[in-house]
């Protein structure tokens, strides 16, 4: 976009909510994004949805869609399929990348082929034995925000967690528990943001710590052992390109005395007041208004170049 770009000429639909377990987070993220876009001068329609149909989406006259949904439907491909059919430019990755990143088992297999270290893991289906030794992390293979995550120290705890989760979730992932420092790296337009170290007061960076409690410490540009910062940035870029991410993402790592371990990558990270990508962007001199405006301009830039997802509809 050129220097004469006028945000007031652009109408943005911000989609939030959705049917997934992270609906509450999405509603908060979407409200923050809509407010920041308005402050940046855009015209905004702030639309809370459950599942939206193509006709309903097309009835909202606007130029670009900013889907701020988290979870398997809103972030994992189905909504992106709909956005492709709608044809307007939209923020975030395309359906194939969305599905791949949402599938933790497939993502870890892909990055491992690239030489990115990731903890030993196994897809767990009902009735199948777990071969990963304890302690381990048991979690849904297609969700985020640590929803239904369980840390199991004994086989008995694994069995109890499976009895609780499998009837509701079906497909789980067992992963080696890495005790160490938790790091995260955001990316915007393929560029790494400052590294953040997460220090939860209660020991586990779970859903409550992420979105409800205020006792988690976030350290921007933490002091790390030699080579670690370069490694996690390189691993994040490798995952970004291999999966096919675009616009924005965030990769999570654990660091122990063996080095950094890739856990997962999120293709639509949170935008709440607790969220990590806005914190890192702000630390890099990019306030929330500039961050969301940059993402909208990236989507519109693809439309101007005739790239996929490029039909612009006048408001």
Image (spheres, grey):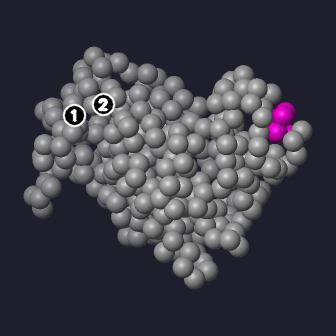
Q: Nearer the viewer, residue 281 or 195?
A: 195
Q: Position of residue 147 (x, y in %)?
A: 65, 39
Residue 28 appears left or right of 161: left
Q: Secondary structure at mark 1?
A: loop
In this view, which residue lies farthest toward the bottom?
A: 226
- Residue at point 49%, 50% (across, down): 110
First in residue order: circle 2 vs circle 1: 2
Q: Position of residue 232 (x, y in %)?
A: 52, 67
Q: Is residue 123 magenta?
A: no
Asked if residue 151 can be seen in this view, the reply is no
Query: Distance of mark 2 from mark 1, alpha carbons?
Result: 7 Å
Q: Looking at the rendering, which quadrant does residue 289 occupy?
A: bottom left
Predominant secondary structure in magenta?
Answer: helix
| Residue range highlighted in magenta | 157-161
Which residue is labeled 1 in the image?
88
Q: Secondary structure at mark 2?
A: helix
Badge 2 vs badge 1, beta-carbon distance below 8 Å: yes
Which residue is labeled 2 in the image?
83
In the depicted structure, whether residue 274 falls above or below residue 147: below
Q: Position of residue 26 (x, y in %)?
A: 49, 38
Residue 263 appears left or right of 282: right
Q: Is residue 160 magenta?
A: yes
């Amino acid at each position: 976009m050129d220097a004469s770009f006028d945000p007031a000429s652009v109408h943005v639909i911000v989609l939030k909510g959705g049917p997934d377990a992270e609906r509450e987070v999405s509603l908060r993220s979407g409200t923050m994004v809509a407010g920041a876009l308005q402050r940046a001068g855009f015209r905004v329609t702030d639309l809370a949805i459950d599942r939206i149909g193509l006709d309903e989406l097309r009835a909202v006259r606007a130029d670009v869609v900013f889907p701020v949904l988290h979870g398997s439907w809103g972030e994992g491909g189905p909504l992106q399929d709909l956005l492709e059919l709608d044809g307007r430019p939209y923020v975030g990755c395309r359906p194939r990348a969305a599905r791949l990143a949402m599938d933790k088992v497939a993502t870890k297999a892909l990055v491992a082929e690239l030489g990115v270290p990731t903890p030993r893991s196994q897809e767990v289906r009902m009735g199948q034995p777990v071969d990963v030794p304890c302690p381990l992390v048991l979690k849904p293979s297609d969700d985020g925000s640590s929803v239904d995550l369980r840390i199991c120290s004994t086989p008995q705890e694994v069995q109890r967690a499976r009895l609780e989760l499998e009837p509701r979730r079906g497909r789980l992932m067992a992963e080696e528990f890495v005790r160490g420092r938790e790091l995260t790296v955001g990316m915007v337009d393929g560029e790494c943001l400052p590294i953040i170290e997460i220090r939860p007061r209660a020991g586990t960076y779970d859903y409550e710590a992420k979105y409800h409690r205020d006792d988690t410490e976030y350290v921007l540009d933490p002091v790390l052992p030699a080579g670690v910062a370069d490694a996690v940035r390189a691993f994040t870029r490798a995952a970004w390109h291999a999966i096919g991410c675009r616009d924005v993402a965030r990769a999570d790592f654990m660091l122990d005395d063996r080095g950094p371990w890739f856990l997962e990558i999120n293709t639509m990270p949170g935008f709440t007041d607790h969220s990590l990508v806005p914190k890192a962007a702000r630390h890099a001199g990019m306030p929330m208004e500039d961050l969301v405006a940059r993402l909208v301009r990236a989507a519109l830039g693809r439309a101007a170049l005739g790239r996929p997802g490029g039909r612009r509809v006048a408001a």
